[in-house]
Image (cartoon, grey):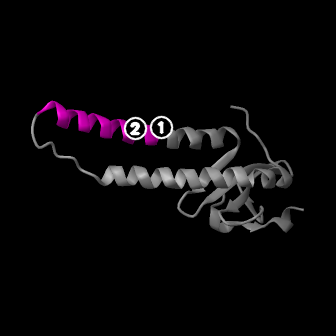
Amino acid sequence: MEKIYYTIEEANLKIKYVEECVIKLMSLERAIRLLDSIEIQPRENNIEDEMMDVEFSLKYHRLNTEFYTLLGELLTKGILVRDLELGVVDFLSRHKDEEVYLCWEQGEKEIKYWHYAQDPFNSRRPISLLK
């Protein structure tokens, strides 16, 4: 896969799309966790119970497929979801021949921070240091 690098301006243009994706991923994750917490105990060994179990499994796997398809779509665009719970997303970028991440957190209107590729999210620095 060829890497995609973003300028600050290009990443800012993607924020609306990324925010919609993050909201969708959060919703899918909640639904998956809910289904994962449900334990179905068949009452009887009959076709109705077996069908209910199959339908439940299909729903669970469809949600997982949708979740990972969307996550993969973002990754192929050079966008990495770092922390879904906080809504932290990194855009792959370059600065002085070095890979860096432009860091966005849900609720922010534009890219305000960045960090080196090897550094964690909490070490992010103001975007003004890149200019």
Q: Let me know if residue 118 appears in the view.
A: no
Tell me if residue 57 is in the magenta stretch: yes
Residue 53, image x, y percentages: 25, 38
Is label 2 in a helix, a strand or a loop? helix
Q: What residue is pinned by disc 2? A: 61
Which image quarter holds the N terminus?
top right
Residue 17, image x, y percentages: 70, 49
Query: CA–CA distance between discs 1 and 2?
Result: 6 Å
Q: Which mark is residue 74?
A: none
10 Å neighbourhood of mark 1: few (<14), some, or many (≥20)?
few
Amino acid type at circle 1 is Thr
10 Å neighbourhood of mark 2: few (<14), some, or many (≥20)?
few
Would you say the residues marked 1 and 2 are in contact, meaning their CB atoms lie under 8 Å apart?
yes
Range of magenta residues: 46-64
Residue 105, image x, y percentages: 66, 63
Residue 126, image x, y percentages: 79, 69
Q: What residue is pinned by disc 1? A: 65
Whether residue 93 is situated above or below residue 110 in the rendered picture:
above
Residue shown at the point (46%, 52%) measured from the top left: 29
Is label 1 in a helix, a strand or a loop? helix
Comparing 66 with 117, the one in front is 66
Comparing 117 with 93, the one in front is 93
Left of 82 or right of it: where is 113?
Answer: right
